[in-house]
Image (cartoon, rainbow, N blue to C red):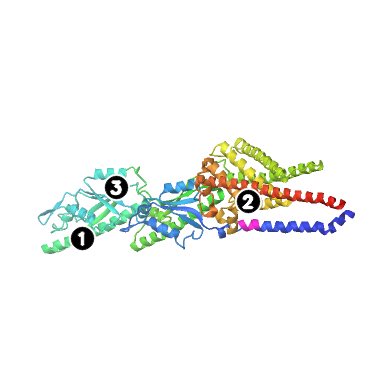
Amino acid sequence: MNTLRVLASPRVWGPVFGVVVVLALIFYAYLAAVVSPEESLKDLPIALVNEDRGGNLAGKDVNLGDRVVDKVTSPDSPAAGTVAWARPHTRGEALEGIGNDEYYGAIIIPRDYTKRISGVAGPPTIPIAVVVEDRGAEISGQPVKLGEEVAGRITSPNSPAPGFVQWTRVSAREKALKGLESGEYYAAIIVPKDYSQRLAGISGPQAPSGQAPAPEPAGIELLTSPAVRPSTTALIENAFTGIVGGVSGATSERILGALSEQGVPVPQGAGRVISDPVRGRVSEADVSGDAGPLPKAPKSAEIEVLTNPSAGQAVSTLAQNICTGIVAAVSRATSGQLSAAAGEQGTQLPPEVAAVVGDPVRANITEAQPVGPDSGNGQSPFFLAFLVNLSGLIGGAAIFFLVEGAAERLEVRDLRPSRSGLWTVRLLLALVYGALVAGAELWVAFGLLGVEHEASTAQVYLFLALATTAAASVTMLFAVAFGAAGIGISAVLNVILGLVSSGGLAPLEALPPFYQAYADWLPLRYAIDGLRSLLFYGGSLDAASLEGGWRDSLWFLGNDGRSEAAGLEDAVWMICSYLALSVVLGYLISLLRDLFTRRERTKTRKLPEGVEG
């Protein structure tokens, strides 16, 4: 039972509660960075390119691409406050920016955007052939061809036909049938051979009863095509009905006027025919219909969305969702405008056109910077960099304690190694450790698992060795400065907080401002950037040249060289800076401790001499 008295000691419970408090703070710091990414999202770099050449819509020259740009970049845009729009001039420039990891995505308004929208704004043009077979007749002693008058009436600018009909005069019925067969025409109006003759029979004095048959109305035939969509055929038939009605009414007035001039009363029994002298007949042409279905359904306009999976799954998905959401908003607004315009004009849209009007703009998603199947959905740079960071922490701690233990054994033998010498030993061990760990990590990643990479294995190896050595050196620096507690500090700052501030789990632009600022000083963030460039963007360590490379990396002085080799240049220089700084600070701390130790030994030696005196 005496062992249970340990539980009564505040020395036991104090550290336990202290660890809980520290962990609670870590939990808060960790979760605060990731719990509300939408609220923190700001200035996500996305390119917006307008290549639209404009066009004619409702008789006016317009550029709908400009309107889209105004809507997207306006304060009431769906992306207002969350996206920092870059405005490259061409699609090629946007692709180049994505290839340098400058943009997480892009919206490209194509050259034919206005043209495509204007093509959806109204019903399709309907080509109809007109064939006049009328042989003519004689009315009141004058030869006439009333069929030609009909053709002229319906094809004139003042035609009673709807404006979407495109008339073509064809010389013979056979040619019209060939046109229906090929899809050149959607229908054909045939004025028969006896058209004028029938009307002539009711335009003058009638023969005595019993000597001639009762007059019959003239006919106009509409031949439809089985290749044409039923909705369009219905439009054609409605137009034909209106045309026949107009022709019949005009012909009736003409006949009545002629009878009145001749002083001839309307013959008994002919009144019904004279009041409606022209009738229409609809029949389906005997053609194959292989040209169908006609007309071709209009296609929605497309806005291209360029995605950047190489930037990482989290940020790529976020950027894609934002871009497609904007395209959907543009489509809704355009649909409302087209529907309102059709309503004002009283236009009856076929179902296939109405369906496109309901969704006139669609997103065409293109992976501008794709990743392969062995890339962890673009997350392999993050995982490799995190393993580097974790390996550096573990290796730095192990080297610190191993060298510390060796130093204690030497002191027992009255061999007192200097702290600066021990720091040199630690650095040499860290260098060997980094080289070995980088080789092991690449053997597993590239050799066993076949992780995708564009740069050479040698370049990736050198970068990993550099990053691992730097991470181990930073850990050892904290340990030298604060003892064993320094390893815990390094774990919190570089691993725990580094995990959420690195941009690997969520884009930096979706983190609270503190974490964004913290990421600028974080080795893990630069390790991810460098590996992402080497693995996906074809980066090369040659980018970290001495020709101004160090100047470009001084982002805190206002320079911005992050587009160099997709961030690899900054990554190399910043990691080298961490390594150099940790080496220098480690030597300074070790030299100060050596100096302090010498003074203590000097005092210890002088004290016995004074006592003896």
The amino acid marked with disc number 1 is Ala
| Residue annotated with mark 2 | 499
* Lateral position of residue 466 relative to residue 273, left or right: right
- Secondary structure at badge 3 equals loop
Q: Are marks 2 and 3 in contact (CB under 8 Å)?
A: no
Q: Main secondary structure of the magenta part?
A: helix
- Secondary structure at badge 1 equals helix
| Residue annotated with mark 1 | 250
Residue range corresponding to the magenta coloring: 29-34
State how far apart marks 3 and 1 are (Cα).
Answer: 27 Å
**On the rendered image, what quadrant is the N terminus found in?**
bottom right
Q: Which mark is residue 185?
A: 3
Residue 287: image x %, image y %? Answer: 31, 43
Q: Are marks 1 and 2 in contact (CB under 8 Å)?
A: no
The amino acid marked with disc number 2 is Leu
Q: Residue at x 36, y 45 (%)?
A: 292
Residue 468: image x %, image y %? Answer: 64, 43
